[in-house]
Image (tube, rainbow, N blue to C red):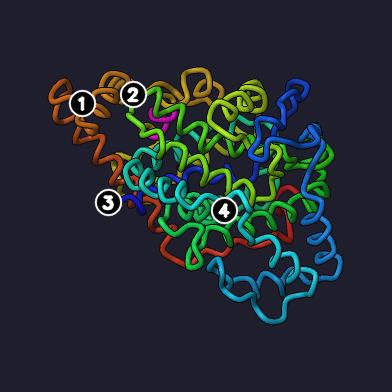
Amino acid sequence: MNRRTVLKAGAALGAAGALTTAAQATPWTWSPARSVPGRGAGTDPHQVWDPECDELVASLAERGEIPRVNKLLKGWIHNEQPLPAGLPDDLHDFLTKARKLPAWTDRSKLAAAARFNEKRGTYLGVIYGFVSGMLSTVIPHEARAVYYSWGGAAMKERISKTAKLGYDIGTANAFAPDGEHIVTCIKTRLAHSGVRHILPKSPYWQHSADEKLPISQADMMVTWHSLPTSAMRQFKKWGVPVDESESAGFLHSWQLTAHFLGIRDEYIPADWASAESQARQVLDPIIGPTSEGIKLADMLLDLGMNLDLTLLSRGVLGALTRFMLGDQVADWLHIPREPVWSPMLEAAWGPYIQVREGLLDVGMPPKAYWLFDEFLRQFVLLYMSELRMPISIQIPTMNNPHYR
């Protein structure tokens, strides 16, 4: 087990996090003065989408070019790789512009982010999987969008594609010419526009949703907070020491990720305090249960059934979800309390973290420590089978066929 495979695995269980839609709970008051550029119009992001990309993808769909475009883009992998020949001119121009690094890119912070990911990859794998991934099932609009879109019909395929986003950001060359993260973000951005174009045509989604168009700027920020902001919250909760410069670097890598996903710079928090203030407005108040979210959580808990990995049973995954997200979320998702694993996690996880950090020499049974390490190892084995083949993020052409 190493940092890369753990990040792949953690990002995999965080599958639902790449397609997010969130309900507007309170009026928008977050100031653009707290954003990366420190300025902006202050427009409510619940009423803003991604018009440039949305209009492009709608045009491609109307011209019947999406299947051909998906085929051409399959081989486009690296950040500064030449664009495939034969792309429509409007798409070629969009991609040329979209993959440019913003002027506020800080290479020294990206180097610090690489150090952070190298040190904290194991923890990030767990957080991306059991905090971000399961949290997405209690974000009402997100759960409905995922369930009624193509992702709801092909969860394992969706997981492998969404995993790539979480894995790529953890690589040392994520934003370098030979890295892949910028391309992965842009392909995800195109996929989001594809969902905006096709999901509103689903009568099942129409009947369930309380919005006319999914995946607003606010919705995407909810997904964003379910990843880096949730990660930093967990580090604080667990008492994991975090170097200040590396923490700032980790945030910067996610700021750039937001930019390449099509989130306007005026909505991207400038620092962790600003991120917390925004998360308290757009994420914390809107979580709750839905029938679609319960079904998605059920699918995620069953992903280890076909492999002989005893520590990744449905009960163990459920216990870890309850431990990470709390009793209320677990109860919403109908996840029972496990008589063995739940109390073990509550009693031994803190000392386990301290032992790993060199802050505690004794204080937990050796068997418990071994079980936690073995769990992480099996967690990797489960998802590596899904991530061995090349992953192609594509623009969707249909919704969940079971819910047309």
Disc nearest the viewer among 4 and 2:
2
The secondary structure that dominates the magenta segment is: helix
Rounded to the nearest angstrom, the CA distance separating label 3 from label 1 is 23 Å
- Horizontal and vertical percent position of residue 298: 52, 36
Residue nearest the viewer, comparing 190 with 312: 190
> What whole-number distance in Å separates the C-alpha atoms at marks 3 and 4?
24 Å
Against 47, residue 261 (above or below) is below
Can the viewer see residue 3 in this picture? yes
State the CA–CA distance, disc 4 to disc 2.
33 Å
Q: Amino acid at mark 3?
A: Met
**Part of the protein shown in magenta:** 316-321
Quadrant in the picture for residue 363: top left
Q: Residues within 10 Å of mark 3 (few under 14, many from 20)?
A: few
- Residue at numbered disc 4: 158
Give the residue pinned by disc 2: 239
The spot of residue 301 in percent (x, y) is 46, 38
Dot 2, how many residues are within 10 Å of its Cα: few (below 14), some (14-19), or many (20+)? few
x then y, percent, for residue 396? 70, 59
- Above or below, comparing residue 271 to residue 162 in the picture: above
Q: Is residue 148 above or below residue 31?
A: below
- Where does the image place residue 123, in percent across and percent down from the top left? 36, 38
Distance between the alpha carbons at the discs numbered 2 and 1: 10 Å
Q: Nearer the viewer, residue 102 or 220?
A: 102
The amino acid pointed to by label 1 is: Leu
Residue at image location 45% in from the left, 49% down from the top: 108
Q: Quadrant of residue 94?
A: bottom right
Mark 2 or mark 1: whose residue is earlier in sequence? 2
Q: Is residue 224 left or right of residue 197?
A: left
- Asked whether disc 2 touches disc 1, contact meaning CB atoms under 8 Å apart, the reply is yes
Badge 3 marks a residue whose secondary structure is: loop
Disc marking residue 1: 3
Q: Amino acid at mark 4?
A: Arg
